[in-house]
Amino acid sequence: MCLEIRQVFEIQKKNASDLARTTAEERLERIRRIENYLQDEERLSELYKAMYDDLHKHEAEVMATEVGVVQAHINHVKRNLHKWMKDRKVPTPLPLIGTRSHIRYEPKGVVLIIAPWNFPFNLTLVPLIYAIAAGNAAILKPSEMAANTSAYISLMVYELFDESEVAVFEGDESVAQQLLDLPFNHIFFTGSPRVGKEVMSRAAAHLSSVTLELGGKSPAIIDETANVKRIAKKLAWAKFINNGQACIAPDYLFVHESVRDGFVIEFGKALEQLYDPSGEGIRNCPDYCRIINDHHYNRLLGLYNDACEKDARILYGGEFDDSELYIAPTLLDNISCDMKIMQEEIFGPMLPMITYRNREDVVPVVEQNPSPLILYIASEDKGNIDYFMDSIPSGSTLTNDYMLSYSNPHLPFGGINSSGLGKSLGFHGFVGFSNERAVMQRKWGSMGMLYPPYTENVRKMFRTIYRWM
């Protein structure tokens, strides 16, 4: 193991008890360091450049999906941290009369945050904010695939924090493996289910708790009552923002046969409005991102070729250019479940579409995949919405819009089973990095009348007490 990694871990371990005793104001002061850093225009410009170099991401998109999200969660923590840190009183059952109980929120200690490459700033900084809010020391491992943004994060943390509070280790998988050898108190991982299983297995060796924010094939359903024109544009935006490289992006689509043709027309119009308003081609649009690297580009090309070989029809897109890792927004029809594109998370700008007649036809297809991170339903029919929600388990459900489930910090965010373990954001994020210590105090009285020897009177008292439990 790299000596520096072990040294920093030990330094944070020694400092953990001091951090645990910090007040809300002291924790907020650390969080404000991040806020102030991001309000510096020169530093923001450096972040814009880093993210453009990594993902061809436009400045406005960086602000909306990266910096803006981080700022929103900073604001939420600033408004609520004092309240979250207070002991929470709980009721006292009648048999325990004479006692008082409460929950005390304590930091877990030293935490590891392993972040992905698709939203490399947002998905590194947001967990860090909640880790600090809960009073932890943290080590960050940003993704080496977004190398420029990773370097930016490393410099920012170096300038803002002592390594006893927050530290960053850049590098490839070998660095992550060295970090996972250490007995962290908690590990927060965002990434694929395949790697999530390994993280969980490695954490088990130390009995470290984990939060796993994983992928998941999130289905989108458009029923016969949906406003097709409005929903088509929302879906086009949601599917192709960040070039489809988002765990909460709609992964595959069910469209009712009665609105199928209208949807296809409106979807094409939406693509032109969003990414080709001047008619110069989507490839030339400065607002359209690129695939992160050759590996993922070739993976997506393989999914596309497999679908085409099995008779998928190309309704829009289907253009690839490996010289600039460009894949056009692509809508595919005539989809079958034996296609690889229906068997793994796409994580790219391709949308397979299935036309359905009866709502009961949708559920068996979804059930072939693990429970989705998010279920999207476009409908004006409450009966249909209730049917799909009752029939398809998911981490979240969003009706008549897309991508917003991550945006409300009052809601828990996270998947179930292969789409995730544990919840994050808002109070749920604070709790995820906290130990909820149960505290009970005897104020008066005792249970002495129930001590041995167990006479007939004691037995009668037990039976009476259990009636009131």
Image (tube, helix red, strand yellow):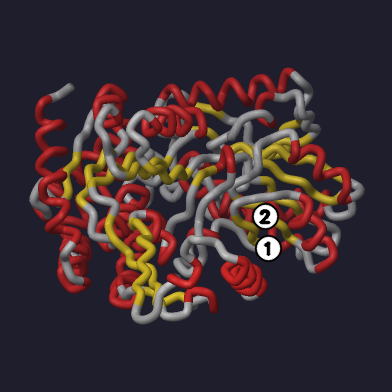
Q: Is residue 273 visible?
A: yes
Checking the image for residue 376, the label placed there is: 2
What's the amino acid at mark 2? Tyr
Report crowding for label 2: few under 14, some 14 to 19, many 20 or more residues within 10 A (C-alpha).
Answer: many
Q: Secondary structure at mark 2?
A: strand
Residue located 84% across and 55% down the image: 259
Q: Is residue 355 left or right of residue 449?
A: right
For mark 1, give the secondary structure: strand
- In the rendered structure, which disc, 1 or 2, sits on the residue that comes first in sequence? 2
Q: CA distance from mark 1 to mark 2?
A: 6 Å
As displayed, is residue 169 above or below residue 133?
above
Determine which quarter of the picture holds residue 155: top left
Where does residue 164 sit, x and y in percent of width and height? 11, 48
- Residue type indicated by callout 1: Thr
Residue that numbered label 1 is attached to: 399
Badge 1 crowding class, 10 Å Cα cut-off, few under 14, some 14 to 19, many 20 or more, is: some
The answer to the question of whether label 1 and label 2 lie on touching residues, with beta carbons closer than 8 A, is yes
Q: Nearer the viewer, residue 103 or 228?
A: 103
Q: Residue at 72% x, 45% y: name it.
A: 253
Q: Could you tell whether 137 is left or right of 254 in the image?
A: left
